[in-house]
Amino acid sequence: MITIILLVLFGLAFGTMWAQKRFKILERDADGHFQKVNYKPIVLAVLVLLFIGLQPYEMKKIEAGYQGLLVDLVGDSRGASTIKEVSGWKVYNTWTEEIHQIPLDQRTIRYEKQAVIAKGGFPCDISPSFNHSVKRATSADMFTNLRTSYRTGGLEAVEQGWLEIAILGAVSDVANKWVIDDIFNNRSGFEAAIVVEANKRVGKWFTISQLRTNIQPPPSIVESIKAKAKAVQDAITSESQAKAATADAQRKIALAKGDSATVVIEASSEAAALRLKQRELSPLYVEYIKASKWNGQLPTTTLGNSTPMINIGK
């Protein structure tokens, strides 16, 4: 601002010197005494300055990534019938026209925490965040319908007004159709349903994507979910332990069957061997065993008429 003022003062000083030399604003006699003032160049200079200061034309550049809308302020239907798309540098009359630049790139928004009611009456806190972009084909219609908000604060005013109401309404209506367990067990499906509903409401002018509800359950639901998760985990653990016990019992039964079979087999083998031995132990063989083990000495004492129990005569 100071630079502009200095430039204006410098221009006035330079212009005054040039006008004095060119138009002889101050007329003097031969001796150099002041005679009169020539007001014509002064009036002309003032008129030129007034024209420069008050003329309605301006030049504006439409930045890359923006759509420029030239709005006729004297048109009918709030100027909507004469909205034109412009780009690059544009000269326009500020008394009868306006230029608005609408960003077309992806923008990210996160709203403050709000309360919604899930199906069954459970309250939950959400602070939704999402990406959105203005549709180029319908931006003029969006501007026409939301002109008051857009002229006061640009697209940010629309985001914090009309768009916020539409998005939070979509979140609330979808949440009312989902039970609390389904919301947290299938959050991706819940948020996808919100995106579909939101695009139904704002899809004429905006495209909504990448929505996250950042939903937080009430403390009572958190405890209930934890208890349910613990019960499920305990059931899984018990089932695993039961399966392990069953497998161990079956192993022991198999081992017992194997031991019993071994005992039966060994007993059968011993019985068969005994039967074979019994068949082989004839009287003659028994006498032979006795003789082979006798050392040839007769007993030194006898009880009655005892004789050696060896039958050699046979």
Image (cartoon, grey):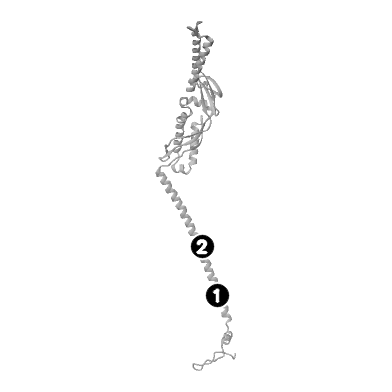
Residue 84 drawn above or below residue 41? below
- Helix, strand or loop for disc 2: helix
Q: Residue at x 51, y 13 (%)?
A: 17
Question: Position of 105 compared to 116: left or right?
Answer: right
Q: Position of residue 290 (x, y in %)?
A: 56, 86
* Res. 86 image quadrant: top right
Location of mark 1 (residue): 270
Q: Position of residue 75 (x, y in %)?
A: 50, 19
Location of mark 2 (residue): 251
Q: Position of residue 266 (x, y in %)?
A: 54, 72
Residue 186 drawn above or below residue 138? below
**Please, which residue is most extreme toward the right here?**
314
Q: Position of residue 85 (x, y in %)?
A: 55, 24
Q: CA distance from mark 2 to mark 1?
A: 29 Å
| Quadrant that contains the C terminus | bottom right
Disc on the earlier residue, 2 or 1: 2
Residue 41 drawn above or below residue 295? above
Q: Residue at x 49, y 40 (%)?
A: 189
Q: Nearer the viewer, residue 283 or 37?
A: 37
* Res. 287 image quadrant: bottom right
**Please, which residue is most extreme toward the bottom here?**
305
| Residue type marked 1 | Glu
Q: Nearer the viewer, residue 242 or 151?
A: 151
Residue depth check, mark 2 versus mark 1: number of the one nearer the observer: 2
| Residue type marked 2 | Arg
Q: Nearer the viewer, residue 148 or 252?
A: 148
Instruction: Say if residue 21 shows up in the picture.
Output: yes
Q: How many marks?
A: 2
Instruction: Say if residue 176 shows up in the picture.
Output: no
